[in-house]
Amino acid sequence: MNDSQILTAAQMRAAEQALFDAGTSVTRLMEVAAGGAAEWIRRIACGRSVTVLCGPGNNGGDGYVIARLLRQAGNEVRLIAPVDPKTDAAREARSKWTGEVLTSGGSVHGGIFVDCLFGSGLARPLSGEHALLLRDLASHHALSVAVDLPSGIASDDGALLNEPLPNYDVTLALGAWKYAHWCLPGSSVMGAKRLVPIGIEAVEGAAQLVTRPSLTPPALDAHKYTRGLAVIIGGEMPGAATLAASAAQRAGAGYVKLLAEGHVSLDPGLVCEGTPLVDAISDRRISALLIGPGLGRDAGAKQKLEAALGAGVPSVLDADALMLLQPDMLRKDQLCLATPHEGELEALCRSCSVIAEGRRNRAQALAQASGMVVLAKGPDTVIAAPDGRIALAPRAPSWLSVAGSGDVLAGIAVSRMASGRGPFEAACEAVWLHSRAARISGPAFTAEELANNTSKALERCL
């Protein structure tokens, strides 16, 4: 089982069809999926009553099976079905339910509400009657659980097809994650997310969820250069580059050097060099470089960017570098990672003549047009590679919305690239480490504290 892949609704249908073609019946697959969901719900309920809302399709069929299994386990179960089943599997599942079937539930109260009204195939808004029923049942129960997806959310982009929708405490993804589980605004109402395996195999071309990296300590005979030399190019605001360097020192690279002119307040362990840039970046021992944090946007900053890209070293481009970047500066054979926030992503798309809607589509189109890996950072971060690979990140703590946190992310990314990772892998690892460092830092931290906790985040991966 691949428990990190993210599928579109079409990919999910094809993956299920592969199981059917291999001999699994629709009814059998429903029993497996609903059985896994029922076990989660039984544990959540802890003996409390359960109300299951069933729709007309196979998601509703899952609900009938869940209700039957919970009743067999000893829970008090009420079942509401405002519409009769319309698929053979759902009709068969209903035929095995021997209890009462309510057609409305405005007055029903209980412990756990289970939403099996509509699943990942929904592409249009709920009727007013169904939307009201959904909200009433959620408000009249202590906890709400969505099976596969909350009804009223588009599977492929997380759009809210109805507003308002209830806030769920738990969402149980069946078989594989869907884009909506990790994309705003839909993911914001799903609560805790759990995956129920049903035997889906790995799907070619599927997106991946960013998960904890698996790292190893340096080799016994390692030294600073074998672990990677990361160079960070400073600019008119040295504080941002210093923050990035501080994070880079704690993210795995053996040697971090800051190229900065004039006096900079430094950690004693950070090497600061004022050598002319062209000479400094000609060092063949450099494994990766970062340019952009605090760079500025004047003619001198543009010259620095051109020189950095001309060195042909694997590079991370952030902040001001993204606003100065022009397509003709990029070499086709260069390994490059761009880390734009929303405004920088829009600017890059304009400069590269990319037209697309939504962060994910813009990131993918920009990656293909520019040849860069694009880490489109935000509350639902997307990482896209020119070869079509895409990764989505679980939501990070909202405390990351603090000045300097992007500089820290860029520093982690260049450190991972200097350690030998390709731009896509480095981006995924950096996003995970950045989020973990935020959780370790607790609430209301500074960017400096975030950088300092990067090493603790790295420790979680060993």
Image: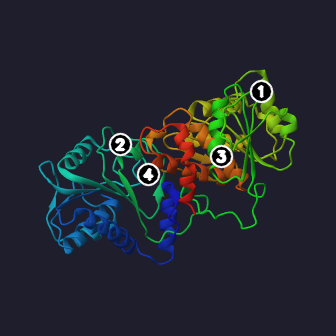
SS class of the residue under badge 3? helix
Kindly report the distance in space between the C-alpha atoms of the residues bearing marks 4 and 3: 31 Å
Please give the residue where the numbered disc 2 appears in the rendered image: 125
The three-letter code of the residue at mark 2 reads Pro
The percent position of residue 367, horizontal first and vertical second, equals 68, 43
Please give the residue where the numbered disc 4 appears in the rendered image: 181
Please give the residue where the numbered disc 1 appears in the rendered image: 302
Identity of the residue drawn at 56% across and 51% down: 433
Circle 2 crowding by C-alpha within 10 Å: few under 14, some 14–19, many from 20:
some
SS class of the residue under badge 4? helix
Q: In this view, which residue lies farthest toward the front?
A: 268
Q: In this view, which residue lies farthest toward the top?
A: 298
Of badges 2 and 4, nearer the viewer stands 4
Please give the residue where the numbered disc 3 appears in the rendered image: 248
Ranked by sequence position, the earlier of labels 3 and 1 is: 3
The percent position of residue 8, horizontal first and vertical second, equals 51, 54
Q: Is residue 263 above or below residue 288?
A: above
Numbered label tally: 4
SS class of the residue under badge 1? helix
Kindly report the distance in space between the C-alpha atoms of the residues bearing marks 3 and 2: 47 Å
Circle 4 crowding by C-alpha within 10 Å: few under 14, some 14–19, many from 20:
many
Ranked by sequence position, the earlier of labels 3 and 2 is: 2
Kindly report the distance in space between the C-alpha atoms of the residues bearing marks 3 and 1: 24 Å
Of badges 4 and 3, nearer the viewer stands 3
The three-letter code of the residue at mark 1 reads Lys
The percent position of residue 152, horizontal first and vertical second, equals 35, 46
Of badges 2 and 1, nearer the viewer stands 1
Q: Nearer the viewer, residue 151 or 182?
A: 182
Ranked by sequence position, the earlier of labels 2 and 4 is: 2
Circle 1 crowding by C-alpha within 10 Å: few under 14, some 14–19, many from 20:
some
